[in-house]
Amino acid sequence: MWLFVAFLLVPLIEIGLFIQIGGLIGLWPTLGIVILTAILGTYLVRSQGLMALNNLRGSFSRLEDPSEPLAHGAMILMAGALLLTPGFFTDAVGFALLAPPIRSALIAYMRKRINVQRFEMGPQPDPFAEQNRPRPRDTVIEGDFHEVSDSKRPTHEGSGWTKH
């Protein structure tokens, strides 16, 4: 139901804002603002996306919970989609999602509403699997041997590929 309301209201809000702003400043300045916000938004999404990716890599290397950097990355991705969509309302929401304090507040709100049942880092080994059983460090291989004396010399001259 909420998705239907969003798909209905957002275009109506955008049309109303285009009419109001276009009536105040004219067609070409309105289109210029839409293009300028798309270019500025692309630059900001790229720079913040790289920072979010570095934070995600850092959380993986420290073996920490990556859910917060992943949530920041998802919100930055959503901000990029909103900023590339022509419109003033979607641009305002997109620029708001690029602000780290707003993203942190949204993550805190979502944490209150989402209950995580279990969290795992990577595949868990099966303790009964053959490859997980302890093995001795030194393996002893039994066998017979006999020494070959150094006095044995080849009867022909070598080809140059081997040493005799």
Image (spheres, helix red, strand yellow):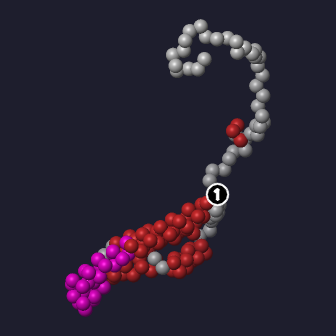
**Amino acid, disc 1:** Glu
- Badge 1 marks a residue whose secondary structure is loop
Q: Is residue 33 left or right of residue 155?
A: left
* Residue, disc 1: 120
Callout count: 1
Residue positioned 60% across, 17% down in the render: 164
Q: Quadrant of residue 109?
A: bottom right
Q: Quadrant of residue 84?
A: bottom left
Look at the image and give the residue range highlighted in magenta: 16-42
Residue positioned 72% across, 14% down in the render: 149
Magenta span: helix, strand or loop, mainly?
Answer: helix
Q: Is residue 54 left or right of residue 90?
A: right
Question: Would residue 76 be seen by someone viewing this image from the given angle?
Answer: no
Q: Residue furthest top?
A: 155
Q: Pick the quarter of the image with the N terminus.
A: bottom left
Q: Is 127 part of what is drawn in magenta?
A: no
| Residue neighbourhood size for the residue with mark 1, other residues' Cα within 10 Å, grouped as few (<14), some (14–19), many (≥20) | few
Q: Is 149 placed above or below 65 here?
A: above
Q: Nearer the viewer, residue 132 or 116?
A: 132
Residue positioned 50% across, 69% down in the render: 51
Q: Is 140 placed above or below 121 here?
A: above
x and y percentages locating residue 54 in the rendered image:
53, 65
